[in-house]
Image (cartoon, rainbow, N blue to C red):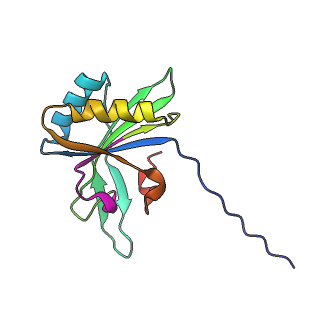
Amino acid sequence: MKKTILSFDLDYDYIIVGISCHYKDYRLVFLINQNLGLHFVKQADHILNIKNSENQQFFSLFKDQNVQEEINFYLLNNRSEFGYLIPEYKQADYIFIAENTEESIIEQLNYLGKIKNINGVLTAFNIDFELLKNKSNLIFE
């Protein structure tokens, strides 16, 4: 009997920007809405289960949806009481995600540049999705 193993890689079209900022999430969302022309709305917290524990991690989540271009935007806290959403980037307080984009350098630079120019943002930097260890942490729906 021949055994066949099915394996596949999910195709993600993400632009991810790490943001270091001392503002509370609602203040940063307000500034991003103003500067990027988005309309983030608070969603139920993004919940992750901690391996080998009964505890869960809760990350505040904001979402905007551009229906015409079929792009979803997310802003999440990177920190919770028990850890990080993206542990490789502990210096990021928030994670900005543009999903379903045709990832181009021009789009990345536009988002990154506009976020960097927001007063109160200490720094913003691109995060390469392919290099993340816990990619499943960024699946919301």
Left or right position of 9 against 118? right
* Magenta region: 86-96
Residue 136 x, y percent position in the rendering: 47, 57
Q: Residue pushed farthest right?
A: 1
Residue drawn at x 42%, y 51% as measured from the top left: 128
Residue 95 x, y percent position in the rendering: 31, 46
89 drawn magenta: yes
Give the camera-side residue of 35 and 48: 35
139 drawn magenta: no
Residue drawn at x 87%, y 79% as measured from the top left: 1
Residue 82 x, y percent position in the rendering: 24, 65
Above or below, 63 relative to 39: below
Above or below, 119 relative to 46: above
Q: Residue pushed farthest bottom?
A: 1
Residue drawn at x 31%, y 25% as measured from the top left: 39
Residue 36 x, y percent position in the rendering: 30, 25
Q: Total marks drawn?
A: 0
Residue drawn at x 73%, y 69% as measured from the top left: 5
Above or below, 19 relative to 100: below
